[in-house]
Amino acid sequence: AGVAAPRVWANPPFSFDTLAGALGTLFEVSTARGWLPVLRAATDAAGPDLQPRPDTRPWAFVFFAGFHLCISFAATKVFVAVVASEFGKQAAGNAQTPRERAWRCMLTHARSLDP
């Protein structure tokens, strides 16, 4: 006959049991690296102190897909904003020739004079 092995119930390395664990799990999902095991564990979770069952919570996919989509959109917006801001800073000083800068300086000075 076979040898009985002790079975140990343990949470996966990612969980929503604590705030720090939940933030770490959501960060892992947002980076799109290794988020499929998190999704599988979430869809298989049957409840506290219950054995996982396949596809118990299929709606968990909607949460993770929506979260991933929103985070990707926000990260893209931040990236574009930073690039546009830096491009604006670079272009403001380099777009004018020295003669154009002198003309602009003269117009600013002329506007400041009283009539």
Image (cartoon, helix red, strand yellow):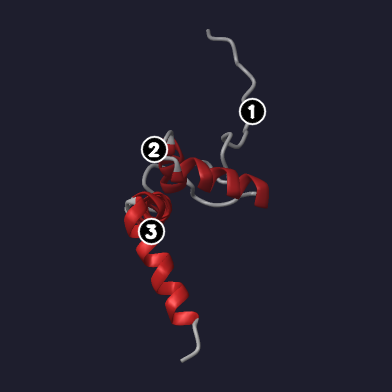
The disc labelled 2 sits on which kind of residue?
Leu
Image marks 2 and 3: residues in contact by CB distance under 8 Å: no
Between discs 3 and 1, the one toward the N terminus: 1
Image marks 3 and 1: residues in contact by CB distance under 8 Å: no
Q: Secondary structure at mark 2?
A: helix
Image marks 2 and 1: residues in contact by CB distance under 8 Å: no
- The residue sitting at 54% across, 52% down in the picture is 47
> Marks 3/1: CA distance?
74 Å
Between discs 2 and 1, the one toward the N terminus: 1
- The residue sitting at 62% across, 33% down in the picture is 9
Residue found farthest to the front: 115
Residue 42 in the image, given as x and y percentages of width and height: 46, 47
The disc labelled 1 sits on which kind of residue?
Val
Within-10-Å neighbours for mark 3: few <14, some 14–19, many 20+: few
Q: Mark 3 highlights which residue?
A: 101
Q: Secondary structure at mark 3?
A: helix
Within-10-Å neighbours for mark 1: few <14, some 14–19, many 20+: few
Residue found farthest to the bottom: 115
- The residue sitting at 66% across, 47% down in the picture is 20
- The residue sitting at 45% across, 46% down in the picture is 30
Q: Quadrant of residue 77?
A: bottom left
The dot on residue 36 is 2
Q: Nearer the viewer, mark 2 or mark 1?
A: 2
Q: Secondary structure at mark 1?
A: loop
Q: Mark 1 highlights which residue?
A: 8
Between discs 2 and 3, the one toward the N terminus: 2
